[in-house]
Image (cartoon, rainbow, N blue to C red):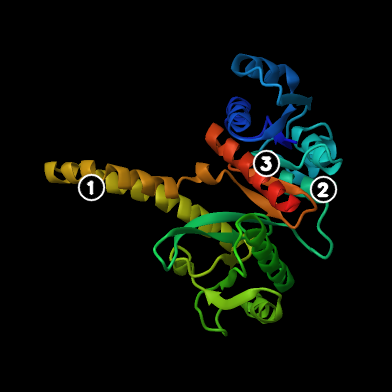
Amino acid sequence: MKTVIALDAMGGDNAPKAVVEGAVLAVEKMDVAIKLVGNKDVIAPLLAATTKSPHLSILHAPEVIGTDEIPTTAIRHKKQSSIMIGLKTVKEGFAAGFVSAGNTGALLAAATVVVGRQPGIERPALGVLLPNRKPSGEPGATLLIDCGANMDCKPLYLAQFAKLGADYLTKVRGLKNPTVGLINVGVEREKGNTLAKEAYELLETADVNFIGNVEALEIPAGAVDVAVCDAFVGNVVLKYTEGFAKNFMYMLKDELTADVRSKIGALISKKAFGRMRQRFNQDEVGGAPFLGLKHLVVKAHGNSNAVAICNAIRQCVLFEQAEQG
């Protein structure tokens, strides 16, 4: 039986065209059926011009929550939005997961209300995989959590984020006893603000493989599998990483085309540079799951293209496969 995923066709800077194209890619590459949630009058012509696959269907949602709308107000007044209807589809069991590149705040607020939190979880958190270099030299990834959902946190939230992140890596990526670190300004136990110090104490007794504080510079070196922080810190780390990776490649290109010798070296190393670019390509990750909810909800990047949408859907499929054992 195919895994059914609900997809917000109206969310994101490149919607609905890129979203529809991403859905088409997904059904071509995976054993999946997709419900495109959004205005049928807009989606239907795009779908008809692209594919006749029976595994793509439209779930009509006449309203859209814009990126500039206040989340709580939007979900209260736009009950027929693509986000609200998509989440209800998951809650009612008609889809295994929901993907949206739309308003992050509205998606979180709506998911918390409609889908609901897992028992005992105070706040769901957004987790994203950042590329790293394992001590063995192999490419790997660190789960950064929270990277966008909870700007103001209590120590208990961070302890719960650690558990959610570790469980996710164990279930979806097959890591046994993943290491957990608390992002801080130093590795010493007494470092940091009040939140960090109190969270450290909770993490020491939590049911996770906590190895202590970790500085941001250690994340690319693969120091931990799960890096825990509040969303303010996490979003700064995430956005800097994305910006640095993108501009580093541009700077490298400038240097490699500066003279004839450099151009020759660049030509010889072209494949290696291509692989390096892929390791930092956010489209390959696709999106970030909201962990701590009763069902899977994945937030795709606002400027996602078709490939990114396809890979966000892949995250849902892998998660569902892991859930089914």
Above or below: residue 121 compared with residue 280:
below
The residue shown at (51%, 43%) is 284
Closer mark to the observer between disc 1 and disc 2:
2
Closer mark to the observer between disc 1 and disc 3:
1
Q: Amino acid at mark 2?
A: Val
Determine which residue is flagged by label 1. Answer: 255
The residue shown at (75%, 24%) is 58
Residue 221 seen anywhere in this rendered image of the structure: yes
Residue sitting at the far right: 92
Q: Nearer the viewer, residue 74 or 14?
A: 14
The residue shown at (68%, 65%) is 161
Sequence-wise, the earlier of marks 1 and 3 is 3
Determine which residue is flagged by label 2. Answer: 115
Sequence-wise, the earlier of marks 1 and 2 is 2
Q: Is residue 169 left or right of residue 222?
A: right
The disc label shown at residue 103, or none = 3
Residue 250 seen anywhere in this rendered image of the structure: no
Residue count near mark 1 (Cα–Cα under 10 Å), binned few <14, some 14–19, many ≥20: few
Above or below: residue 30 compared with residue 144:
above
Sequence-wise, the earlier of marks 3 and 2 is 3
Above or below: residue 85 compared with residue 209:
above
Q: Is residue 238 left or right of residue 318?
A: left
Residue 104: x and y in percent read 67, 45
Q: Gap between marks 1 and 3, in whole Å?
A: 38 Å
Local SS, label 1:
helix
Local SS, label 2:
loop
Residue 69: x and y in percent read 71, 39
The disc label shown at residue 190, or none = none
Q: Amino acid at mark 1?
A: Glu
Quarter of the figure with the N terminus: top right
